[in-house]
Image (tube, rainbow, N blue to C red):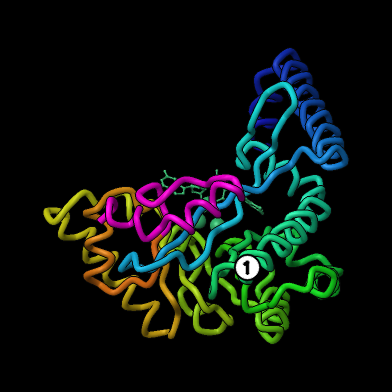
Amino acid sequence: ADAAMYAAKAKGKGTFQYFEAHMNVEAQRRIELETKLRRALENGEFVLCYQPKADVGLSGITGAEALVRWRHPADGMIAPDRFIPVAEETGLIYPLGNWILRTAFLQAKAWAARFPGFRLAINLSARQLLADEFIADLADILRETGVSPQSIELEITESLVMHDIDTATRRLRSITAQGIRIAMDDFGTGYSSLSYLQKLPIDILKIDRSFIQEYTGPQDVERAALIKAIIAMGRSLNMRVVAEGVETAQQLELLSRHACDEIQGYLLSPAISAEQLECYCADFPQRSKAVS
Ligand code: C2E
Ligand code: MG
Ligand code: MG
Ligand code: MG
């Protein structure tokens, strides 16, 4: 932004005024969106969808990932990419994140009772994990909902950890001490060193979908080697390895051959409503025959 301002200034006063006006429009848009998000939270317009995960042999559903959507009264379903960044910048991610945790924990409790071993994964933002109140709030939500911590996974990203590695490490240790598992999401897309991987209490490695999607078949020898290496690394660090964005039977075959643990992706299902997920789990033995 500084460079842009400098360039605008260098071009003369007219350009700078234009630039300033443009900035005001952008700032205005953010303030409006923040107000809308706050109201949406009060009005109960956020919903969670759930994307199932299965073991690589497709013998059963292992759990699901909760993915938030904004059900806008006029504009319909809005994807998280369009509001999570603003919620993070404005701090609204904190109350929204607590709503997501509470809703997902209640759902996880119901599903763990119905589908043995079922675990629900929930995405965490940096602002949430690094907030002073987070550990206390998490304990409150666990107690209020009565969910078993063993039914919960929290997904974090490399960039989240890199914000403040010492605080993140302390918080993650206190979370895993309570029995909740930690997954490293979108693995392979960050810029951080690998050394933190063994220092942090990470139980699950989720290979980013870009690695999986680039693989189109056995002729992709180098891409296959990369996926194989990531799986081997995760396993040697005693992590479960999950592949996200699995869309084709060929991708599944590769992951199965290299002993990845779980898969998630459109090959199984997109994110669906809670009711649809229940039908999906009940019908899975039939469905899995069609997939493989
Ligand atoms: P993510 O955690 O990496 O979630 C996976 C995204 O990949 C989801 O997009 C999912 O719909 C999409 N996806 C799953 N399988 C496939 C596939 O086979 N092919 C393709 N092309 N895409 C697939 P979605 O729901 O739009 O979520 C986008 C991102 O928004 C998430 O990425 C996550 O970073 C963030 N997000 C979603 N829900 C939450 C939340 O509750 N809290 C926070 N903090 N972030 C969230
Ligand atoms: Mg995720
Ligand atoms: Mg991911
Ligand atoms: Mg992502």
**Residue located at (26% from left, 70% from top):** 228
| Quadrant position of the C terminus in the picture | bottom left
Q: Which residues are magenta?
A: 264-292
Taking the magenta stretch, the answer to whether it contains residue 187 is no
**Which quadrant of the structure image shows residue 37?**
top right
Q: Is residue 258 above or below residue 16?
A: below
Q: Position of residue 267 (x, y in %)?
A: 35, 49
130, 205: nearer the viewer: 205
Find out if the beta carbon at label 1 lies less than 8 Å from the nearest ligand 2 atom: no
x and y, in percent, of residue 42 in the image: 88, 41
Q: Position of residue 189 (x, y in %)?
A: 45, 57
For residue 199, what is the image quadrant? bottom right
Residue shown at 83% from the left, 53% from the top? 95
Task: Say which element carries label 1.
Answer: strand
Left or right: 186, with 201 as reference point: left
User: Does residue 95 appear left or right of residue 166 in this picture?
Assistant: right
| Magenta-drawn stretch, dominant element (helix, strand or loop) | helix
Q: Is residue 253 left or right of residue 48?
A: left
- The vertical placement of 71 against 118, above or below, is above
Picture coordinates of residue 21 (x, y %)? Answer: 78, 19
Whether the magenta-drawn stretch holds residue 274 is answered as: yes
Residue drawn at 85 percent across, 74 percent down? 136
Q: Which residue is mark 1?
A: 154
Q: Callout 1: 10 Å neighbours few (<14), some, many (20+)?
A: many
Task: State which quarter of the image contains the N terminus.
Answer: top right
